[in-house]
Amino acid sequence: MSRSFDLVVIGSGAAAGNIASQCRAAGWSVAMVDKRPFGGTCALRGCDPKKVLVSAAAAVDAGRVLAGKGVEPDGLRLDWPALMQFKRTFTDPVPAARRTALAKAGIETFDGVARFVGATRITVDGEMLEATRALAIATGAVPVPLPIEGSEHVMISDDFLNLDSLPSSIVFIGGGYISFEFAHVAARAGASVTIVHRGARPLEAFDRDLVARLVDRTRELGIDLRLSTEVRRVESARGRSRVVGFAESEEVAFETDLVVHGAGRVPDLEELNLEAAGVRRSGAGVVVNEYLQSVSNPMVYAAGDCADSGGPPLSPVAGYEGRIAAANLLEGNHLKTEYSTVPSVVFTIPPLARVGLDEDEARRQELRFTVRLEDTSGWNSSRRVGERHSAFKVLVEDGTDRIVGAHLLGPRADETINVFALAMRAGIPASQLRRMLWAYPTYASDIAYY
Ligand SMILES: Cc1cc2nc3c(=O)[nH]c(=O)nc-3n(C[C@H](O)[C@H](O)[C@H](O)COP(=O)(O)OP(=O)(O)OC[C@H]3O[C@@H](n4cnc5c(N)ncnc54)[C@H](O)[C@@H]3O)c2cc1C
C-alpha cells in the first residue's frame, strides 16, 4: 500500500519539527517518520536532560566553593536516583506531547526506520510513503562507531543520561564537550572520573587559553585528564572494565566500573539507503547547496546534524536550518544559511563559551585585530561565588571596532555569550557595547571592562 503526501519528513527533532510545521501551516499535507520515540535528541537524549543534571551539579558546587566563605556546605550532595527521577519529569512527557501537537496540526506520524526505495519514495515498517512535492531528511547524528576492540563494552551518551545509579568510577573516551560536561557532573556526584583524549588538546573547537584554565579547574576537581592517549581496546570481566591505550607508545590501562563514549558524533544516514534516491552524501552528511537542497536530487532537502551544511551540530542551528529549508520549499530557493554568529557552550561548571572567530580563524581570514585576554578570577563577579577560574578573550577588528570573536570562561558565561552574539549580529561596535548601561552587579555589567 502506498500513501501520498506533499511532504515527507524523516526525523522528529528540532530541524524536522520546523520543516513539518511550517509546510503544514501553508496547507501542505505532511507525514513525519521517526524510528525512535518522537521528540529528537535535544529534548530526549541531549541538551535538555543534560542541563537538568548540570544544574543540580552546579547547585552542589556553588555551596562547596563557598565553604568557609559564609556557607556551611555539610550534607550538600547529589542524590543520583532522585536526580534521575527529576530528569525524567522533563523527558518522559515529550513523545506523547509531541505527537499530540503534531496530530493537532494535522501532521500524520509514522513509526519505524525510513528507507528510500526511489527518488521520492520511502518505506516505513512495510508501508510506502510517496512525496509529491518534497522530502526532507532531518535524521540527526549518532555516536561515531569506535574502531577499537571491545567497543560493545562502551556505553553511549543516551545510556549515561539514563543511569539509575552512578558507578564509583567512570572513564570517558574522547575529550569533547559531551565528555567534559558529563565528567563535571559525575565528579560532583562523587565518582572517580578519567577522560582519555587522543589529541594533545581537548575541546579543540574552543579558545586554547580558556581551555587551559578549564583544564586546571577540571584537574582540581580530581578528574584524571589524560591527553595524547589513544584508546585501543576495552576489556570487560565480572562487571569491571579495563580501558587499554597508548601514550607515547607506552601502554596505559585504566580499571573502571563504566566506560562512556564521548568521542564524537556522525550523521545518522546509514539506514536510509540514500543511493536509491540518488542523494549524495559526504562524511559530514547529506551534501546540500546553500539553500539546504540536495545537490543530486532536487526533490530532497536536508537540515540539522545530518546535513553537510557547514553549520555546527547544535540544536538552535538544527531549528534554524529547518526554518530555512521550509521557507525555500514553500517560496522557492531564496534564503541562504549563515552561521557567523552562532554561540556555542561547553556546560561544564563553570561553563566555557564562544561566538564568532578564534585567533587562528581570524588570522586565516587576514584580519587585523586586537586581542583582549584577561583573567577575571580576581574580579568581584567570580570571587563572590567562589570561582577561581574565569577569563575572557575578545577579538576586535582594528579600524572598524567590530567584534570578531568572544570567548568566555566563568560563572554564567553561557548567558553572557548571548549578549556578544546579539551585539555581533546587530553590528554593535565594541566601544558602544562597553558603554551600555547594564544592570549592576551582573555578569553583563563586567562587559564594560572587557
Ligand atoms: C549528550 C548530548 C548533549 C547535547 N547538548 C547540546 C547542547 O547543550 N546544546 C546544543 O545546542 N546542542 C546539544 N546537542 C546537540 C543537539 O542535540 C543536536 O544538534 C540536535 O538535537 C540535532 O537536531 P536534529 O533535528 O538535526 O536531529 P535529532 O534531534 O537528532 O533528530 C533526528 C531524529 O531522526 C530519527 N531518525 C534517524 N534516522 C532515521 C531513519 N532512518 N528513519 C526514521 N527516523 C530516523 C532519530 O531517531 C531522531 O529522533 C547535544 C547532543 C547530545 C547527544
Image: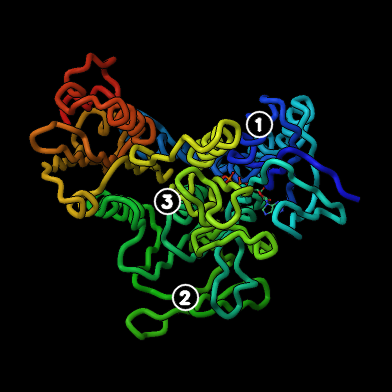
Q: Which residue is drawn at 78% across and 47% down?
A: 130
* Residue depth check, mark 2 versus mark 3: number of the one nearer the observer: 3
Q: Earlier in the sequence, mark 2 or mark 3?
A: 2
Dot 1 and dot 3 residues touching (CB under 8 Å): no
Q: Residue at 55% x, 45% y: name it.
A: 303
Which residue carries the number 1 mark?
23
Q: Is mark 3 on a helix, strand or loop?
A: loop
Closer to the chain start, of discs 1 and 2, is 1
Spatial CA span between label 1 and label 3: 24 Å
Distance between the alpha carbons at the discs numbered 2 and 3? 29 Å
Which image quadrant is residue 79 in? top right
Distance from the alpha carbon under mark 1 to that under mark 2: 46 Å
- Location of mark 3 (residue): 310
Residue 313 appears left or right of 139: left
The answer to whether residue 174 is above or below residue 323 is below
Q: Name the residue under label 2.
A: 231
Q: In front of the other: label 1 or label 3?
A: 1
Label number found at residue 3 = none
Query: The C terminus is located in which quarter?
Result: top left
Query: Which of the pair 292/200 is nearer the observer?
Result: 292
From what the image shows, is residue 377 above or below residue 423? below
- Residues 240 and 94: in front is 94
Confirm whether residue 199 shows in the render: yes
In the rendered structure, which amino acid carries the disc numbered 2?
A: Val
Of circles 1 and 2, the one toward us is 1
